[in-house]
Image (cartoon, helix red, strand yellow):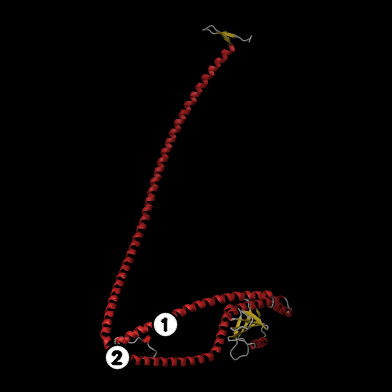
Amino acid sequence: MANETNIMCPKCGAEFPLTEAVSHRLREQMTAEFEEERKSLNAALTEREAKLAADQKALQEEVAQRVETERKKLIDEAAHQAEERLGTQMRDLQNQLQEKRAKLKEAQEAELKLRREQRKLEETKSSLELEVERRLAAERKKIADTARAQATEAERLNLAEKDKVISDLQHEIKNLKQKADQSSVQLQGETLELELEKELRGAFPYDDIAEVKKGQRGADISQGVRTNQGSDCGAILWEAKRARRWSGRWLAKLKEDQRAAHADLAVIVTTCPPDGVEGIGQQDGVWVCEPAFAVALGSALRQGLISTTAQRVQESNRAEKAQLLYDHVCSVEFRQHIQALVETFVGLKQQLEAEQRALAKQWKEREQQLHKALTHTAMVYGGVQGIAGREALPEIARLQLPGAA
């Protein structure tokens, strides 16, 4: 630039612009200041790093010391706890070992005692067999001729005695059968009636179950249906019949008893239902069922009476409610419920009969096996007794006829 002032270097005499000299000096001054500040910062940073390193080292040493202290403390506590647990386990194991040793000793003593008794029995058995063999050998020749002579007579007497016993038993069986036939019908009927009354009382504890006394006119059992609150809902008459065949006169008699007792429903429980009735059914307005379905039928009829009574409380028209009860009892839904109960009970009955047949077969097989075992035992003992004599082998009471000397 034309107006730019030049200055001369006093040393070399060179000329250069004034601005360049000023800027160069400023640069050197700022560079010196920056260098000095950088050195100061580096020194402070180095001092701080040294202090941080010292603090970190001191902290690490303190942490290491604390960790070591806690580690020793934990090791001591773990060792103490392990020692206690180990001591308890050792004592428990020692106790178990003592108990096992005691049991082992008892078992060994028992086994030793059993072996001794077994050896004693074997020795006794061997001695007895030897003694029997000696007696048989000594007596065999002596009694052979006598046995041949007495065999025919003894057999004849035995056959005669057996015929006499069989004849007496047949006569006694005939008498017992006659007595049993005379009282079986009445006894079976009373048994069925008592069982029916027991089942009804157990199934319906809120109802009034009353037995009709012997000699009084009427059905066997009267059931007054009541709710849990004690409200009367009607009556059911029960007639128990245990016979070989169905009689139509039972229906007429029960219907008369029903009208006389003003009962709502009537049921005949019989072991011989009429044709067309399996489990539960109706005959001329009277319910008929087998004994196994009595409680199920009673539950259904009782529920119908309770439902009708509940409707009767809401409405005052008794004729209409009686029609409702009749419609409910004669409805398809009610019959389906009864049929479902019948099918369930029939299935249970068939299963029970199958189990009874299986058990009866097993009992019969065991009875035959026991009979064979007793027969062969008696034959073996009798054969030995025939050879050795009754003095050597006395009679066994259970192998004799009752009353025999």
Question: Between 18 and 193, which is closer to the camera in this rendering?
Answer: 193
Identity, as a three-letter code, of the amino acid under mark 1: His
Note whether residue 333 is visible. Answer: yes
At 41% from the left and 40% from the top, the residue drawn is 64
In this image, 219 relative to 57: left or right?
right
Q: Does 385 appear above or below 97?
A: below
> In the orientation shown, which residue stands out farthest toward the top?
13
Q: Is mark 1 on a helix, strand or loop?
A: helix
Q: Which quarter of the figure has residue 145?
A: bottom left
Decide which of tag 2 and tag 1 comes sooner along the chain.
2
Q: Which of 333 and 79 is in front in this view?
A: 333
Q: Give the x, y percent position of residue 369.
A: 42, 80
Where, by quadrant of the figure, is residue 239 drawn?
A: bottom right
Image quarter hosting the N terminus: top right
Above or below residue 313? Residue 89 is above
Neighbour class for label 2 at 10 Å: few (<14), some, many (≥20)?
A: few
User: Residue drawn at (57%, 15%), measured in percent from left and top?
Assistant: 23
Vertical position of residue 117 compared to residue 246: above or below: above
Name the amino acid, label 2: Thr
Classify mark 1: residues with Cα within 10 Å, few (<14), some (14-19) or many (20+).
few
Question: Going by the image, does 119 lie left or right of 353?
Answer: left
Please state the horizontal and vertical placement of residue 275, each as a whole percent of the image. 63, 83
Residue 146 circle label? 2
Decide: is 289 above or below 107.
below
Camera-side mark, 2 or 1: 2
Query: Which part of the image, by quadrant, shows the C terminus?
Result: bottom left
Alpha carbon separation for disc pair 2 and 1 = 32 Å
SS category of the residue bearing label 2: helix
* Residue at image location 31% in from the left, 72% down from the top: 114
Residue labelled with disc 1: 371
The one of 180 and 306 positioned closer to us in this rendering: 180
Q: Residue 110 carries which label?
A: none
